[in-house]
Image (spheres, grey):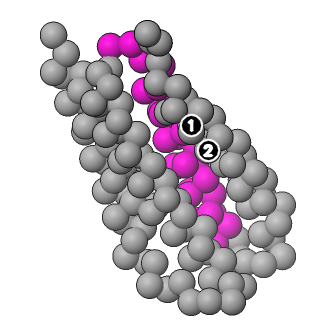
Amino acid sequence: MRDYNKNIVITASVLAAITIAIGAFGAHGLKQLVDSEAIATFETGVRYQMYHCLALLVVGFAKPISENTRKWVFRFFLFGIVFFSGSIYLLVLKAVLPFAVSFLGPITPLGGLFFIIGWLRLAYGFFSLK
């Protein structure tokens, strides 16, 4: 039996690579499209995405964490990345997108809530260790 969760580790690694690509786009491609305030907002999405990719790598490799805790933390962090960072990326680009994304404004805090719940679930997983 493995001491790590292969799916979580692979997903976290691929997401980290995607995060680097998105960050590079933000650093080099956004200057011509949006103002500096929007770039700073975009960078927040990239930063939170990378934090949670790294956290998922730790969760995937941490031996004491139960599979149930790993699965739930993985789900919450993944939804957090999609809703928080994903909505930020689209909202920053709304001026250049061919479709409306303003409805995503309320989605961003929901992503933040998923992150918080994921961290609390991780804490509970460690707390309940015997």
Going 66% across and 48% down the picture, which residue do you hit?
A: 19
Amino acid at the residue labelled 1? Ala
Answer whether labels 2 and 1 touch (C-beta < 8 Å).
Answer: yes
Q: Residue 12 carries which label?
A: 1
* Mark 2 residue element: helix
**Image quadrant assignment for residue 53:** top right
The residue shown at (46%, 78%) is 104
Q: Indicate whether 16 appears above or below 90.
A: above
Callout 1 environment at 10 Å: few (<14), some (14 to 19), or many (20+)? many
Type of amino acid at the residue the image marks with label 2: Leu
Q: Is residue 69 above or below residue 78?
A: above
Residue 39 drawn in magenta: yes
| Crowd class of label 2 (few under 14; some 14 to 19; many from 20; radius 10 Å) | many
The stretch of residues the image draws in magenta is: 37-64
Give me the residue at 69% from left, 49% from top: 18
Q: Is mark 1 on a helix, strand or loop?
A: helix
Query: Which residue, given by chain and number where applicable, does mark 2 sit on?
Result: 15
